[in-house]
Every structure is written in C-alpha cells, then in structure tokens.
Amino acid sequence: MDNLKTSFGKTKVPKSTKTKLVQKVFSNVAKNYDLMNDLMSLGLHRLWKKELINMMNIQITDNIVDVGSGTGDLINLIIKKNLKNDVYSVDLNNEMLKYGKIRFKSKKIKFVNANAENLPFKDNHFDKYIISFCLRNVTNIKKALGEAYRILKPGGNFYCLEFSKPESNVVEFLYKNYKKYIIPLIGEKITNNRSAYEYLEESIDQFPSQQELLKAISKIGFKETRYLNIFNGIVTVHSGFKV
C-alpha cells in the first residue's frame, strides 16, 4: 500500500526498509566522506557550517546535541567554544561514529549510536539541537522533529542545515545538472560508488522546500520559526525555539 511506502531517492520503498538502505549507503562511503564533502562542495560546506555556528550564539553553559553528526565537522567547531558541559555526537551509522571517535580524543564529547526518530535522552535536556545534512535521510521527518522538540528545554533552540531549493532559475538549472551529472561522477572516481551519490542527488530533490519544512517545524510546536537561504538557497538553515 502507498501509505506504507516512502521515498529512497526517487524509488518508493517500504518505510520499514528505508533506514537500512540509507545506512548502507553511508557505511559504504564513510572512509571517504570528508574528502567527498570537500570535493563536491568545493570546500564550501565548511563555510556553511561556520555560518550555522555563528548563528547559534553558543554560550559556555549550553548543553548541545548534534544529531546526524557524521564524522564531526560541527563538533569540531562547537568544542572551540570551550563549553563547560559535554557535547553529544549522535549518529545511527557506526562507521561514521568510528571515524568521529578517531578524530576526537576529548572526553567531553559523548558519542551516541541512535536514530533521530528515537533519541535516548530525557525530556527538556538540551539548550541547542542541531541536525546538519541529515534530515532528508530520515524515514519519518515528523517523528525526528518531534524528538527534537521533546529533548529541548523550554527556550531551547532548534537548527537544521540542509540542501534546499535555489531561488534563481539560472542557479537551479546549473545546480540541478551539477548534482545529477558531476557529483555521481566524482563519487564514482573517489569512492567507486556512483549509486551512493546518485542517491544524494535524488534525496535532495525529494526533500521538502523551504516553506514546506518551515510549516512542518511550526506544526510540531516550535515558535518564531524562520529560514535563512545561503548560496541562493542551495543550502538553508531553518530555526525555531521551544516555549
């Protein structure tokens, strides 16, 4: 039945299998994940992540969780703020977490293997929740947003950095062709896995638009929701806070 299926790229699959399929993709590319991010974005993903961190106005007493943390690019920026509390790096993929653990030796970073749809944290615990280039890979986005709301303290802030829809038709045309033809080619040459990066292109196309995601975040209960387009909307930061 259609209501039991969801999108895995452009393919419709049972909801029960999407998570495993996505995790297989990331396990296969984990070794070259950081290199591919640099090549695909021409290094710009580092600027996008710095922009996000600057927006967050991190305080030294903040409790922060980074969901879909991958190999820890954002964690690397967060720990430079010299927080008093532990920072939580959460990812469902153990291969990604393995590379994060190799990268960081700080005891203040807690690595947690968990699904964004079912987080092992108590209610009202974190001051800031981040999900970066991960939400489009989640099987049930509504559940993931609900979990974000649950674990944030009243007054806590939600941030989502994700690929989105360019504002300009010209930029959209160039971007569409770049991710359809060039990114899979780079993936094939570097990781010998073209299909993983074809999935990347398809997952971006299937992800909700800026306005659609804004509505979903607001519907969960977040207030003063907004989004900031970066690079003409190729990437977007959505934010809101819990009352």
Image (cartoon, helix red, strand yellow):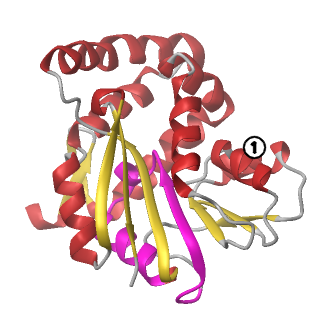
Evaluate whether residue 1 shows in this view: no
- Residue 110 is situated, as x and y percent measured from the top left of the image, at 77, 66
Q: Amino acid at mark 1?
A: Tyr
| Quadrant in the picture for residue 185 | top left
Where does the magenta region start and end? 122-150
- Residue 53 is situated, as x and y percent measured from the top left of the image, at 58, 48
Q: Is residue 110 magenta?
A: no
Q: Is residue 138 magenta?
A: yes
155 sits to left or right of 72: left
- Residue 229 is situated, as x and y percent measured from the top left of the image, at 32, 38
Position above or below: 142 against 8: below
| Quadrant in the picture for residue 214 | bottom left
Evaluate whether residue 5 shows in this view: yes
Q: Where does the C terminus fall, quadrant-wise?
A: bottom left
| Quadrant in the picture for residue 17 | bottom left
212 sits to left or right of 83: left
Please tell me which residue is depicted at 44% across the width and 73% down the height of the picture: 148
